[in-house]
């Protein structure tokens, strides 16, 4: 299904793998989503303590990929926690 991008006015395939990977809205092409960093979907991150018990699983909502990466980095630096 072809859509016209609201940013660059180029027709793009809404069902293309590139668009699926990039995310963004249905009227934004994959190139613009990546270039303009339009993907704002909340990234959920599961944190589990090192003992592996499910009761300690924390789901962290990160506003951005940067925040998510920072959380992952902080977790990996903590020997008592594993990223799941
Ligand atoms: Zn575009």
Image (cartoon, helix red, strand yellow):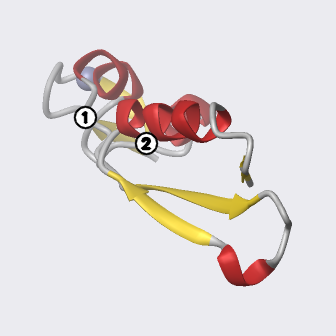
Q: How far apart are labels 2 and 1 at the CA level?
A: 8 Å
Q: Is residue 42 visible?
A: yes
Residue 43 location in percent, x, y? 45, 52
Residue 71 location in percent, x, y? 48, 41
Residue drawn at 46 percent across, 61 percent down? 60
Residue drawn at 46 percent across, 47 percent down? 1
> As rendered, which of 51 and 22 lies closer to the eye?
51
Q: How many marks?
A: 2
Within the displayed image, which quadrant is ligand 1 positioned in?
A: top left
Q: Residues within 10 Å of mark 1 (few under 14, many from 20)?
A: some
Q: Is residue 78 left or right of residue 26?
A: right
The numbered mark, 2 or 1, whose residue comes first in the sequence reads 2
Q: Residues within 10 Å of mark 2 (few under 14, many from 20)?
A: some
For label 1, the residue is: 38
Determine if the C-beta at disc 2 is less than 8 A from ligand 1.
no
Report which quarter residue 34 is drawn in: top left
Q: Is residue 22 visible?
A: no
Quadrant for the C terminus in the image: bottom right
> As rendered, which of 33 and 12 lies closer to the eye?
33
> As rendered, which of 59 and 3 lies closer to the eye?
59
Q: Going by the picture, which residue comes out furthest to the right? A: 52
Residue 64's tag is: none
Residue drawn at 74 percent across, 40 percent down? 79
- Asked if disc 2 and disc 1 are in contact, CB closer than 8 Å, the reply is yes
Vertical position of residue 61 compared to residue 19: above or below: below
Q: Is residue 48 left or right of residue 67?
A: right
> As rendered, which of 75 and 43 lies closer to the eye?
75
Vertical position of residue 84 compared to residue 3: above or below: below
Residue 23's tag is: 2
């Amino acid at each position: 299904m072809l859509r016209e991008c609201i940013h660059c006015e180029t027709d793009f395939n809404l069902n293309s793998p590139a668009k699926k990977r990039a995310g963004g809205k249905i009227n934004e092409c994959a190139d613009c989503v990546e270039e303009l960093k339009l993907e704002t979907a909340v990234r959920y991150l599961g944190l589990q303590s090192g003992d592996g018990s499910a009761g300690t699983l924390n789901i962290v909502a990160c506003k951005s990929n940067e925040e998510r990466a920072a959380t992952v980095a902080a977790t990996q630096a903590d020997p008592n926690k594993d990223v799941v």
